[in-house]
Image: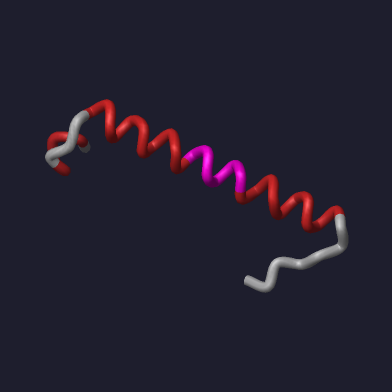
Amino acid sequence: MAAAEKIERGYLGALLRLQLLASGLVKAILQVDRRRGRRCPL
């Protein structure tokens, strides 16, 4: 993937890890909102 996008492998790895972290953060936020009785408008 890195070669196809013409970027460094380390940079690609950092982007992929960040994407996974962001997904986990979104899930955590939604779980807290559910516990407080809020619903996601999406």
**Relative to 13, does residue 36 appear above or below in the rendering?**
below
The N terminus lies in quadrant: top left
**Relative to 39, does residue 24 appear above or below in the rendering?**
above
In the image, 2: left or right of 38? left
Residue 31 % position (x, y): 75, 50
In the image, 8: left or right of 11? left
Q: Residue furthest bottom?
A: 41
Snapshot colouring: secondary structure
Residue 29 % position (x, y): 69, 51
Report the predominant secondary structure element of the magenta stretch. helix
Residue at horizontal 29%, vertical 35%?
12
Residue at horizontal 13%, vertical 35%?
3
Residue 7 % position (x, y): 17, 37
Question: Is residue 1 on the magenta stretch?
Answer: no
Question: Is residue 23 on the magenta stretch?
Answer: yes
The image quarter in which residue 41 lies: bottom right
In the image, 9: left or right of 40? left
Magenta-colored span: 20-25
The C terminus lies in quadrant: bottom right
Q: Residue furthest top?
A: 10
The image quarter in which residue 16 lies: top left
Residue 25 % position (x, y): 61, 44
Residue at horizontal 81%, vertical 57%?
34
User: Toward the viewer: 27 or 11?
Assistant: 11
Number of labels in the image equals 0
